[in-house]
Image: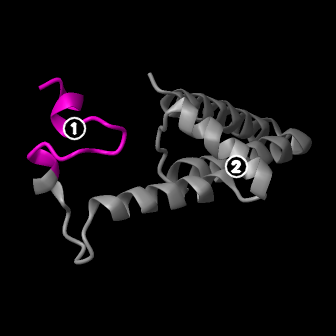
Amino acid sequence: MSRSSTAAILLFLALLAGAVGLVDSAREGAGDHLVLFAAVVVLGSALGFWTFVGNPTVTIRHDILRWATRRSQLTGERVDQIVGRAVDGYRALLEPADGEPASSDVRRGAAVPGGASEGDRDGG
């Protein structure tokens, strides 16, 4: 199970517990608890929406993350901006100016950045 699925499950369970507490507090007439549980549900929902709906999660290698983090500390730029620019640069290498993917070159065994051909990476 990935970290993002684990986080989603834990957030869902926290929201479920908050909702149960909210209903229970409303039935008992405990106004202070009602406000507390309502805040938990609203803030948890906002966190879930912001985290899981806003930007898709992409897993990158640890060495690339370390590099981006170090670069971020040197430049003050956010890590996601550095990684986004790096991916854009790599994408520009793979696509010719007309925007069509250069996949036919890769399939014929053209060199892929990193020194291996596409066939080498597939094990073929």
Quadrant of residue 116 within the rendered picture: top left
Q: Are marks 2 and 1 in contact (CB under 8 Å)?
A: no
Instruction: Tell me the kind of residue under disc 2.
Output: Arg
Magenta stretch bounds? 106-124
In the rendered image of this protein, does residue 111 appear above or below residue 96?
above
Closest to the observer: 109 or 1? 109
For the residue labelled by badge 2, is the local secondary structure a helix, a strand or a loop?
A: helix
* Mark linked to residue 71: 2
Of the two numbered discs 2 and 1 on the same chain, state the one appearing first in sequence. 2
The residue that mark 1 highlights is 117
Figure quadrant of the N terminus: top left
Callout 2 crowding tier (Cα within 10 Å): few <14, some 14–19, many ≥20: some
Q: In terms of secondary structure, what is the magenta stretch mainly?
A: loop
Relative side of 12 to 31, left or right:
left
Compared with residue 47, is residue 13 higher up or lower down, i.e. above or below?
above
- Residue 22 lies, in percent from the top left, at 73, 40
Q: Residue 109, position in %: x, y?
A: 13, 42
